[in-house]
Image (cartoon, rainbow, N blue to C red):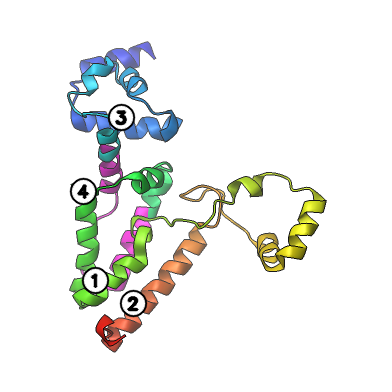
Amino acid sequence: MAQQVESARRVPLSRDRVLRAAVALADEIGIESLSMRKLAQQLGVVPMALYKHVANKEQLLDGMVDVVVGEVDPPVRGSDWKSAVRQRILSARRTLRRHRWASQVIESRTTPTPVVLEYMDSMIGMFRDGGFSVDLTHHVMHALGSRMMGFTQELFDDSASSDAETPPAVSHEMADKYPYITEMAMARAHDAESAVGPGCDDQFEFEFALDLLLDGFERLHRQGWTSTEH
């Protein structure tokens, strides 16, 4: 450890190095435990040295999002729009599976960074290059929402209830009051390695919904759908 810190001190500090070190540290200890002090310790510098490259914690988080989004594969050239969009979104999902804290940070940002704007612009461009009108593309982007970035926002976080053992009496009461919820809960088979943690956002369900959306977009595009007609 001492040798690693000493080696880190000899490498010049830069904004890129600070951000990539922050991403690696968040991968290791979680985003909640990340602090400027711990990051400085990891880099073998005093905390004040970081502020030459990031003004504050919020700017650090913005930069970390940029690093993560920058890892998403670029659009596939020469493919039809549907394949290109699907491959890009699934690449984004693979990226978030490597950085499981990232969806939480992306959701917390109030203003998109230039890297995120470039990503969104390229996504829009894939639909426009595929012949979609500006009108339809606008509604497509709303329909995709966070799925465009590789994750979905669940209505409820059921990870706590699924981990705890429910007393039999409570289970029977739940089944009587909410039979269809209970039926679905008993039948589900979810992926504990979801990009957004335990819950309903496993890989199969993500791709299932993505393909439904893409098929729907394709149908509307072929029909020449416009919002002014509805």
Q: Amino acid at mark 1?
A: Phe
Q: Which residues are magenta?
A: 63-92
* Residue 92 pos. (x, y %): 34, 54
Contact flag, marks 4 and 3 (Cβ < 8 Å) = no
Q: Which residue is mark 1?
A: 127
The quarter holding residue 186 reads bottom right
Contact flag, marks 1 and 3 (Cβ < 8 Å) = no
Closer to the N terminus: mark 2 or mark 3?
Answer: 3
Q: Which residue is mark 2?
A: 217
Closer to the N terminus: mark 2 or mark 1?
Answer: 1
Q: Main secondary structure of the magenta part?
A: helix
Contact flag, marks 2 and 1 (Cβ < 8 Å) = yes
Q: Which mark is residue 115?
A: 4
Q: Which mark is residue 196?
A: none
In this orientation, does residue 80 appear? Answer: no
* Residue 209 pos. (x, y %): 45, 68
Q: Which residue is mark 3?
A: 21
Q: CA distance from mark 2 to mark 4?
A: 26 Å
How crowded is the residue under tag 2: few (<14 C-alpha within 10 Å), some, or many (20+)?
A: many
Left or right of 28 in this view: 50: left
Left or right of 33 in this view: 131: left
